[in-house]
Image (tube, grey):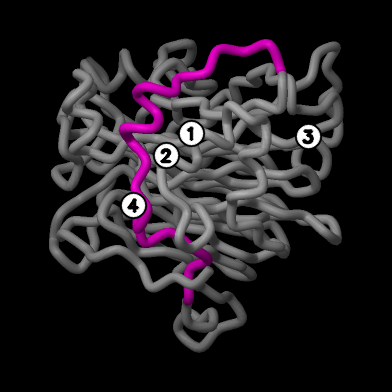
Amino acid sequence: MGELYPLLMVPGFDPRPWGTHDLSPIYPNQKFGEKIGEAWLTGDECKVANGFLAGQSLAEIGKTYQRELVGDAARDAGRFPLLVKFLFPHEKLSVQVHPDDVQALKVGQPWGKTECWYVAHAKPGAQIALGLKDGVSVSQLEKAIHDQRAEELLNWLNVYSGDTIYVAGGTVHTLGPGSVIVETQQQSDTTYRLYDYGRPRELHLKDGLAAVKLKAGSGKVVRAAPAQIDGRKSRRGELVAAPYFMVDIFELKDPQVLSTRDGSGKSSAQILVALEGCGTVQAAGSEAITLAKGDAVVVPACMEQFTVSPQWTLELLRSRVPGSRLPEPETRI
């Protein structure tokens, strides 16, 4: 078994009926014959592009290296804890809900699916729906689904580039067209489809309605302004700090040394996703690898420290598991 190193991931492009053939502005040179809705970056089956582990999936690598890869902040030593992906909604997604941890255990799943969305790009008028309008009950939602008017009961919000939205498990939600989203979530693909505008796809009303929470703490995240790093031109902003993940945004103009440990002293694998520009990622004893727009690099927790060096400028997101139990973030609807 060789030593771990920063892992450049191969995007997994997933067809969806609400997707698009053109994945600009993230992958402007990628053209597809079918509509692509998602680009998976750290799913269980996502594969590595570089080094002696090239061609192996995160699931395979996780079983072999366990805590060396995921760190001691992760709940499960043998499974990568976070799924990060791009979403490219060209039409409305189905109205759906994910279970929280408690509801997931009731149906035999190891954990639920809480997630957050960073709006990387948004056209004028782009919207999401998050939660039910005040006073709407689950039974009223069920009736509206059968009456083909479920959209009327949802909270619709305008979204803008730079917004971060926290979507707690149990929240009824959907995405409208016109945005590009970076989603960070618990490593789960448990989705209950409640309403799909007449598309011929299966609904999951029994499990889905049982998972709905009327008050779940979801909303646009209220966050502080980005801060300078060491008084230089580079900037860092905390997008969300939540029980299952922490996500930061960096605008780098000079090299930065980052750690796989947080203030608790516990370690976590680091997921770096480039939104604009280009740069390199390097840890001691490993080769530098290039990180360009649309790329994701997983830095194993055992690396301790690593350096991100921009080529001119580099805008990236960093996602990881917090070492201590955090409350849900402050949000607003």
Q: Which residue is mark 3?
A: 91
* Eye-nearest disc, 3 or 2: 2
Q: Nearer the viewer, residue 296 or 2?
A: 296
Name the amino acid, label 3: Glu
Residue 235 horizontal/vertical position (percent): 56, 76
Secondary element at image label 1: helix
Looking at marks 3 and 4 on the same chain, the residue that comes earlier in the sequence is marked by 3
The picture quadrant where one finds residue 44 is top left
The magenta span reads 199-222
Q: Nearer the viewer, residue 222 or 305?
A: 222
Spatial separation of the CA atoms under disc 3 and disc 2: 27 Å
Q: Which residue is mark 2?
A: 139
* Quadrant in the picture for the N terminus: top left
Q: Nearer the viewer, residue 317 or 190?
A: 190
Name the amino acid, label 1: Glu
Label of residue 36 in the image: none
Looking at marks 1 and 3 on the same chain, the residue that comes earlier in the sequence is marked by 3
Tell me: residue 241, above or below residue 93. below
Label of residue 142 in the image: 1
Spatial separation of the CA atoms under disc 1 and disc 3: 23 Å
* Eye-nearest disc, 1 or 3: 1
Spatial separation of the CA atoms under disc 3 and disc 4: 28 Å
On whether residue 99 falls in the magenta region, the answer is no
Are circles 1 and 3 on residues that touch, CB within 8 Å? no
Secondary element at image label 3: loop
Give the residue drawn at x 85%, y 61%.
124
Looking at marks 4 and 2 on the same chain, the residue that comes earlier in the sequence is marked by 2
Q: Which residue is mark 4?
A: 245
